[in-house]
Amino acid sequence: MKVIFLGVGEACDEDMPNNSHLIVSDTVLLLDCGYSVPGQLWKYNPDHAFLDAIYISHRHADHYFGIPALLVRMWEEKRTKPLTFICPGGLKEVIGELIEYGYKTLTDKFEFEIYFKEAEKRQSIMFNELNLKFAPTIHSVENFAIKVSDGRNTVCFSGDGMFNGETEKLYRDSDLVIHESYSLDQRIPGHACITDLLHMAQRNHIKCLALTHLQRDLRKHEIGHIEHKISQKKLKIIIPEPFEEYSF
Ligand SMILES: [Zn+2]
Ligand SMILES: [Zn+2]
């Protein structure tokens, strides 16, 4: 299994594409698909059949507004391989409406099937060889963090939101946790701060913590300070750049 950090930015960052990552195993899974993600994916791999599934963590534009563009190109390029959306319960309709709003009647023209797997918290879903588990975070809309395991390695992705007891349990002992890190030490409702994340990673024996979705000014002006702060820790912590890869 390897992970490609396609985009690492928050919603309004002019430099960094939206927070989105690829899990490449025998199955290829895209984690979130914000409005600036399709271009990143096509630059990484333009093959219309590359993706098997897309996970959407929650209904904010920087996490799912890229779907219509992604699908219209699949249609143009005559994809026939089925595509599966995995999302928290209730998002199936929202995603369907977004596609219809973006490109009316597009779904009628597809030569490929679209399937939905709606997740509930504490439930496990098998998708091909991948075992998927979910836990809610504290965010302004319902957001599910996801844990992806191929039997050898385990990767978690927060989507957006502050962790709680349930999310910590999901993250425990993982090989890689990709977490939104909106602020340094200020507690902003519905988001996680780096100081809290460092403690959380330590007490849950996380092998590597990837900090993404940093507030744009923080990333621009305080990256040196943050890198110094995390270098003091015994934990492995990275602040990935777009297209950086993490292999196990
Ligand atoms: Zn976001
Ligand atoms: Zn959000």
Image: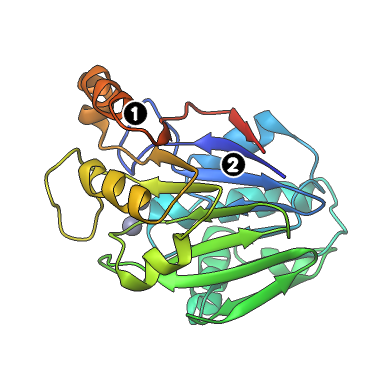
Q: Mark 2 points at which residue?
A: 38
| Displayed-image quarter of ligand 2 | bottom left
Q: Please, what is the three-letter code of the amino acid marked with disc 2?
A: Pro
Determine the image quadrant of residue 140.
Answer: bottom left
- Residue sitting at x 57%, y 72%: 96
- Marks 2/1 in contact by CB < 8 Å: the verdict is no
Q: Can residue 41 be seen in this view?
A: yes
Q: Mark 1 points at which residue?
A: 14
In the drawing, does residue 229 fall left or right of residue 121? left
- The C terminus is located in which quarter? top right
The mark nearer the N terminus, 2 or 1, is: 1
Neighbour class for label 2 at 10 Å: few (<14), some, many (≥20)? many
In the drawing, does residue 236 fall left or right of residue 246? left
Indicate the position of residue 185 as horizontal and vertical percent values.
14, 41
Q: How far apart are marks 2 and 1 (CA)?
A: 16 Å
- Residue sitting at x 26%, y 32%: 216
Indicate the position of residue 26 as horizontal and vertical percent values.
82, 51
Q: Please, what is the three-letter code of the amino acid marked with disc 1?
A: Glu
Q: Most extreme residue toward the left, as rendered?
A: 186
In this rendering, the answer to whether 213 lies above or below 167 is: above
